[in-house]
Amino acid sequence: MAQTKRKTKHRGNAAGMVESRGRTGRPPTAAERKGTAASEKSKARERQLNRLDRPPTWRGAIVKAMLAAIALLLIGILVLKNSSEAIELFPIVLLLYIPVSYYADVWAYKRRQRLKASAKAKAKAEAKAKAEA
């Protein structure tokens, strides 16, 4: 007769630690779920702000100009009956878009820095006025 011994799952690893798979406790409350989503959103917002605080580079301008020129090339191929015209215009458009993209980024960066500086100065003045009052 065959053995009827009940087999159990292997528990633990070579070091003797028992690891549970996944979540084994109670389901999270709405507040707990909301808290993690809010922290992820705040982290994403912080990353975006850090990216906006970096000064523009020519490399970034070249990438943006390349994407814009490729989009214009595809539209030109679809719209124009003679696609060789669109292909001939591609390098010209690319060379024109690079400085335009860079200087637009410089303008936006400087504007953002001015706005941040004025907001800091305004907050500092308000704090000083509060301290005096």
Image (spheres, helix red, strand yellow):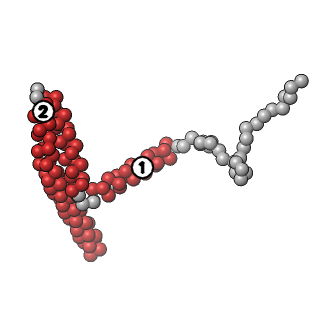
Identify residue for label 1: 40
- Nearest to viewer (mark 2 / mark 1): 2
In the image, residue 17 lies at what x, y percent?
Answer: 70, 51
3D distance between C-alphas at marks 2 and 1: 48 Å
Which residue is rendered at x = 50% and y = 47% of the image?
32
> Quadrant where the N terminus lies?
top right
Image quadrant assignment for residue 80 = top left
Residue in the foreground of this view, choosing between 68 and 48: 68
| Relative horizontal placement of residue 80, taking residue 8 as reference (left or right) | left
**Where residue 129 appears, x then y in whole percent?**
25, 72
Looking at the picture, tell me which residue is in the foreground, 82 or 58.
Answer: 82
Residue at 18% over, 58% down: 106
On screen, residue 22 versus residue 109, left or right, reads right
Task: Identify which amino acid the numbered label 2 is placed on.
Answer: Ser
Instruction: Name the residue located 23 percent from the left edge and 58 percent from the top edge.
Output: 57
| Residue placed under numbered mark 2 in the picture | 84
Between 132 and 64, the one nearer to me in the picture: 64
Disc 1, SS: helix
